[in-house]
Image (cartoon, grey):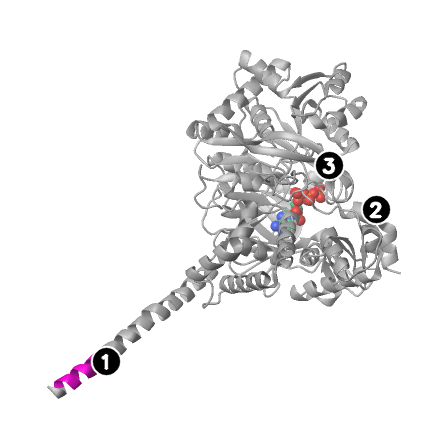
Amino acid sequence: MASIDAGNSISLQHNSRDAHTIAIFVGVLVPVLFFFLFTNMKNRRQRGVRVEVGGETGLAFRNSQYPTLLEIPFEGASTIAALFEQSCKHHEHARLLGTRKLINRQQEVGEDGKPCERLHLGNYEWITYGGAFKRVSNFASGLMQLGHKTGQRTAIFAETRAEWLIALQACFRCNITVVSIYPSLGGEALALSLNETEVSTVICEQKQMQKLIDISQHLDTVKRIVYMEDKGITTESSVSRTSSHWTVSSFSEVESLGRQNPAKPNLPVPADIAVIMYTSGSTGIPKGVMMTHGNVVATTAAVTTIVPELSSEDIYLAYLPLGHIFELAAECTMVAMGCAIGYGSPSTLVDSSNMIKKGTKGDAPILRPTLMTAVPAILDRLRDGVRRKVETKRNISRKLFDISYRRSLAAIEGSWNSGWAVEKLLWDKIVFRKIRAILGGHVRGLLSGGAPLSEDTQRFVNICIGAPILQGYGLTETCAGATFSEWDDSTVGRVGPPLPNCYVKLVNWEDGGYMTNDSPMPQGEIVIGGANVTLGYFKRKVETNEVYKMDERGTRWFYTGDIGRFHPDGCLEVIDRKKYIIKLQHGERVPLGKVEAALVVSHYVENIMLNGDHLHSYCVALVVPSLKALETWAQREMLVYNDFEDLCQKKEAITEIHLSLMKVAKQANLKNFEIPKKIKLLPHPWTPDTNLVTAALKLKRGVIQQTFEEELKELYN
Ligand SMILES: Nc1ncnc2c1ncn2[C@@H]1O[C@H](COP(=O)(O)OP(=O)(O)OP(=O)(O)O)[C@@H](O)[C@H]1O
């Protein structure tokens, strides 16, 4: 018995040891093995593949999932008008356009002591796809009734709002080409673009009327104005003053005119020009790009493949300028998939936005979007806002944030022992939930584009928002999209493989020394070919022929002037624009935009422009400091100063910001010659109104260099 007992106990011990081993194997090794397998598979996936194409010799890639180029999102949707009509029928009862109710406007005094307007906004009020289709049809009929003829052009001169999209779609139903104009455009540029494109009807916001009145003597072709009504803004006097020149009608008058006089649509074909869109103007005078319906639907088709399971369950927050192709393409994509679009603005986006009345809610927390777009400057601000908020917290909360951030970062970067589901849930619940609430708490994807995004910002926002930050690369000339990083690609600093609607080719830039046989990665000028490449610049044949080329196989190529490199998995990294890669006195090359994107990570920096040239051996920088960050530091240091302007002159402030720039430069592995040796602090913000940045918040280098010529000279003394 005893031996049996002993044997039993031994075999029991054996069994329990075996069970233990199995448990360890199943509980630890299997997940670890799976983790490595999965991570490897994800990281090794070939996202872009080589392709043989026509035209200039180079190295071309296409999207690995699409052997042939995608041109339309659905059967029959070959124009934006047809796509809109199909979607409205298919999603008739789903919500399409949401606008916040304006409760009142109030004049207050801002933090800087200047008067400012604050808005008390209520909930979103919605129009369904069916309702929007009726309004579009009515507005289209109304325009015809007013006397606007097919073949004449309209201009939309307004901030992003539901009526923008209604007017745009209405024009397309009558095959009218729309000229899109940024509301921040100054009088002279406004007159120039309206005259150049021979616009007959301007559709604007009530608040933009005065700008038109001021230049009315210089407008050669405008015959009528349709203004979008704004609650609480009166234009009676302006309307009567202009009536001698133009026919002036309100948006709702045109709709009701159309309702009473329905007209047959005159639908476009894919080759018709849908939009003449002006480029941002970051490198000079904006050029009008002619985009066909075919171009826009090709972009729409491609972008629908980027966001998984895009559907009428999705809510998109629209607030970037619709006059920029990035926003227009995003909204067309949302419409194609039946999503709801809630309108907001950069100055009312979150609770702390400068036009939101204290104690009331920003657009995002009310709308609770699932998808958003952003330009890098906005993501940088979001990151700074979160960092500032964390800094004001008690020591323990700060520590908790740091730990959770570090652990989440390690998980994303592939550490096997962090970021497991339970741990992730814990950090989400106790740390990140509050940050996510800033944008409503439901964002599942954020699309960034239009300019270089710093790796630090991309990662920071990705972790804090808990959603992928997809980076896209494209130009107005390529109808936004050329490449987009993919949903499951957790790397930063790259812009993904080619979109399924185009090829992306690198060609040698010998003068700059970027060659397709460079090692370890091929480099060169980025050339884009496919259905999204637009017709060219309006009335600028010479410039068009310089950068647009048709190859022997019928593919249209656009030479972007940007320099990039392809990673082994077929993803593109944009190095910078040719124009922005400058050579210093001793021949070192500095990609200004890329370096600025790394330096803007300093929490002291609101805006920065790096400057360098072949006459000097070092770079310098003009910096607009963040008022909040610099003043908080100055108070902590008990520095005495009169006002912000005075603070920006203080040696201590300059040194503090310079040190911070050097720190972030080191973290981003910048080379010594890329780091500015001297800096100048400028107290006034660079906004589109100052003409120092574009409507999409990109630097206008030429204008900045001219405006601060003296300051730059001083920095080189
Ligand atoms: N993800 C990105 N990373 C880096 N640069 C980008 C990215 N997306 C866009 N860009 C830059 O933006 C440029 C396209 O910008 P856009 O079409 O808005 O007008 P613009 O080129 O700034 O204006 P203009 O042609 O009048 O100077 C590209 O050529 C590229 O330099």
| Percent position of residue 172, x then y | 56, 26
**Can residue 421 be seen in this snapshot?**
yes
Looking at marks 2 and 1 on the same chain, the residue that comes earlier in the sequence is marked by 1
Q: Residues within 10 Å of mark 3 (few under 14, many from 20)?
A: some
Residue on which disc 2 sits: 707
| Percent position of residue 299, x then y | 54, 40
Query: Mark 2 to mark 3: distance in Å?
Result: 31 Å
Quarter of the image for the C terminus: give it: bottom right
- The amino acid at mark 1 is His
Q: Is residue 269 magenta?
A: no
Q: Which label sits on residue 612?
A: none
Residue on which disc 1 sits: 14
Q: Is residue 13 magenta?
A: yes
Q: Are marks 2 and 1 in contact (CB under 8 Å)?
A: no
Query: Mark 2 to mark 1: distance in Å?
Result: 82 Å
Secondary structure of the residue carrying tag 2 is: helix
Q: Nearer the viewer, mark 2 or mark 3?
A: 3
Secondary structure of the residue carrying tag 1 is: helix
The magenta region covers 4-14
Whether disc 3's CB lies below 8 Å from ligand 1 is answered no
For image coordinates 44% across by 35% down, the residue present is 74
Residue on which disc 3 sits: 108
